[in-house]
Image (tube, rainbow, N blue to C red):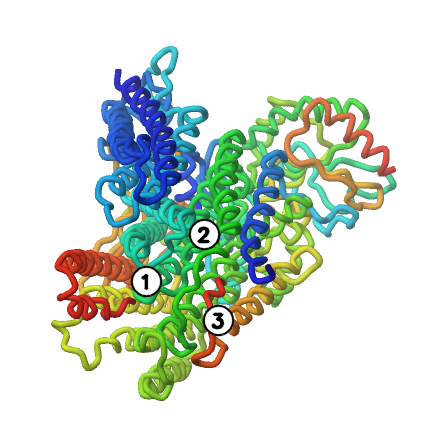
Amino acid sequence: MIRSVLALLLTLLALPGAVPALGQDTMPPAPYAYTQLEDPALEAEASALMHTLRCLKCQSQSIADSDAPMAGDMRHQVRSRILAGESPDQIRAWLVARYGDYVSYEPTVSATTWPLFAIPLLVILIGAGVLLRRLGRRRGETGAEAGE
Amino acid sequence: MIAEIGLAALWLAAALAVLQMVSGAAALRAGEGAVDPLAIYARPAAIVQAVLAVLAFLMLLWAFAITDLSIKLVATNSHSMKPLIYKLTGTWGNHEGSMLLWVGVLALSGGLLAAFEKRLPQNTMGATLAVQGFVALGFYAFLLLSSNPFERLPVPAVEGTGLNPLLQDIGLAIHPPTLYAGYVGLSVAFSLAMGALLTREVNPNFARVMRPWVLGAWVLLTLGITAGSYWAYYELGWGGWWFWDPVENASFMPWLAATALMHSVSVLAARDALRTWTIMLGVLAFSMSMLGTFLVRSGVLTSVHAFAVDPERGSFILALLGLYIGGAFTIFALRAGAVAEGKRFAAVSREGALVFNNVMLSAILAIVLLGTLYPLLTEAFNVRVSVGPPYFNPASAIFAVPMFLVMAVGPILRWKDDKPARIQFEVMLVAALLIGVIAAVSFFGSFPFLPLLGLGLAAALAVAAILPLRGRKLTRVPVATWGMVIAHFGVAVSLFGMACEGAFTEERLAAVAPGGTEQVGDFSVTLESVTPVAGPNWTALEARLAVSQNGGAPVILAPQARNFWSPPQATSESALLTRWDGQLYAVIGNQAEDGRWQIRVWWKPFVTFIWYGGLLIALGGVLAIAGRVRVDVKRRSAVAKADARRADLEALEAQPAE
Amino acid sequence: MKTRLWLWVPLALFAFFAGLAGYMLTQPKDQFVESTMIGEPLPDFALDPAFGGLPGAAKADFAGGRPRLLNIWASWCLPCIAEAPQLEALKAQGVEIIGIAIRDRPEDVARFLARYGNPYTRIGSDRISEVQLAIGSSGVPETFVIDGEGVIRYQHIGDIRADDVAVLLAELEKAK
């Protein structure tokens, strides 16, 4: 969301994904696109999931933050499936099976995403190494300007 | 004529940038004491250049004010029917205009540096101005060769296309100029770092020159991000304030680097330690602001519904990035090894805590950079992935949590060497608050882990922030120390707002017939009516929502669904009811076929604290600048008064930095 | 020398990024989200007719050993007007095209077909994009090649241009 405003700003370019444009349908939204589930616990589950699913018609917005009709239809899918007893993970997997990892903002460790998890570990190690080198020495010994 | 004056001023400024570069380089080569005949031109060139670049920007501002439709940029981005304020702010609501603003601020800060900075050795100053001129030259070339804001149309347009309605908001007046000024302030820090590196003058004196620029840039970045976050929050209609989107990250990464740099430069100024690290961060901070510019304008990271991005523009910025940042890292690699070692310190010391937090900030920066660029990397292999909040939140928390804990006790540690036992009480207090708050909140309900942790940390940090004042006479506490206390307290306030928003927000989406009532939190919201209203360049449907808290007297909120006609676009104007303990956020949606209206209402407890915290952080920065400048002025007069006053001078120097 | 090696790390990382960014700038920006259902059977569905003139569409209609096109479209979609002649051309080649109209009204569908031609044998009405989501389609128009066993074999995203007709015919041939 902030993205759209900033993007617009910084780039001069118009048309955020969520705004109805020419060639937009006039149909009413799907039943659960703008209607919450009765059960607050289920709605919380659905809402948490919706915030981590990507709206395919927008630029980097979650389906929970978009007025695009397709985002509404996806919200309907999420809520009605939660209501039917599916777990958020099942629904996420159902969508990933159709659109690939792109649809989910929550990367999981896989052949294509392992560096996202390996590099932070590396950063932890480097950080610990740097700190040990800079600070780990005993008082009075050299605390040279070791850089990092 | 207006456009021609502006264009001529830009070309002249570019020519002066060349002169500044050559003259500065001559001063660098001449060395201390010797005078190169060319060297005297650098300062005047920078000053006149500043005047010219600002003149060029004012010309464009004027063209937008009178809606001169013979200028292409005005015709494609403005409209004669637009309110004057949005005509003016529209000047930088587009690529060319915003680049001109950027260049104007860049030249202005270069001019200020040239006019007022007399403390640096001549060759360091020459090198700094040469680098500054080199950077400015690249951006002039960018403007003049590929993004000319003053381009005329062969035939003047009859009417302008208009400005994107989302940008027709007061937010556009504040957010981009502040953010740009922050980015550009970092360019001065960059030039100074390069100047010091080239002349091996990395010392406390240099750090004192650099510090106000870093602090100033950091304050502006803080304000820019805070304003941008709040603007997006109320303008976009879904109540979100931060999404880890590439463009948000592009503004956040320079801030992280600047935060680290600001602390590091303080250590350098006060203790003559962290020399290489400060230079490194100086280069890194400006790299991040240029990287942000590249990511946003080249379009490599936008996805579905991509903008009509000009690849030439992206290539140009990438070339500049390669030239400046690649060049700077090369000089860094060649020269940094020759920078003399700084002062030593123990692990448990204020420097030690600052180093720890610098490493943590850098680690967060690395994570944000990785998450932002990773989709770009996989796209090179034709795989598309999304990296969003579920990744960024925990991954950055791994480093942010230890950082906050160290931040709580760092300011009460002594410089150089300290004993953990001395601050035993403070450590216990912070730990007790952290655990106590988390335990107490968990007792009342089950909340997500990160917001819960955030609440505990916020409480601990708020108390820890004021601990440095303990046992001191408040009237004698230096202004800069007040700045640190307030900024650290602001972090706690902001964190509290974020955690509350994350843990306690209540949402109500419903289709409501006129007269119908919905309940959210303590509030009952009644839809009284929906009526058409008209503005200067839009029409709207306005809902009247009577909102009453716990059955109290109702307040009317009037969210609108607006339709702008030039360009044709619909927006949601949210309506906000601000209470001290939170905000009620209401949006009107579409009408269903049965005549009911979609409304979305959120009660967001303490959400405003996020931005109050941001303002406090910025205020702390302003106080730090004021305090430093005062100390520096005193220091200079003290130096002038010779050795007899040396004792006084040391008393001043002993004042703690943040 | 060993202690100075790290000084080159920032430059190396930067060079890597600059190379990647430079490469990506030269790449055409792929704006489409491709379905990952290629090679999978169609999900079960049975949609009501989109208007009075033709029957609705169901999974069962994609059986019998003959490959067909599944065209995702809508009367409110502008590129769908542009691809109408190409669909006619495909129909003239003997291709059976089954349509799914997304978020559409019967009267609008009828008006669109009267105006731009009707290449379909069946049109199902998908009022909440249910089937569209189930087959991994992310916009209108999109065209899928479905083989005679009801397995998705190929996806074409966006409107069908004149030179896409041959591609689709070849894909239909491959799906036999």
Residue type pointed to by label 2: Leu
Question: Quarter of the image containing the N terminus of chain B?
Answer: top left
What residue does disc 3 label?
Answer: A134
Residue type pointed to by label 1: Ser
- Residue in the picture at 50% in, 56% down: B337
Depth check: C173 or C16 in front?
C16
What residue does disc 1 label?
Answer: B266
How many other residues sit within 10 Å of disc 1, few (<14), some (14-19) or many (≥20)? many
Point out residue B391 in the picture as x, y percentages from the top left corner. Answer: 54, 61
The quarter holding residue B569 reads top left
Q: Is residue B229 above or below residue C162?
A: below
What residue does disc 2 label?
Answer: B284
The chain that hosts pointer 3 is A
The chain that hosts pointer 2 is B
- Residue in the picture at 48% in, 62% down: A147
Point out residue B543 in the picture as x, y percentages from the top left corner. Answer: 29, 47
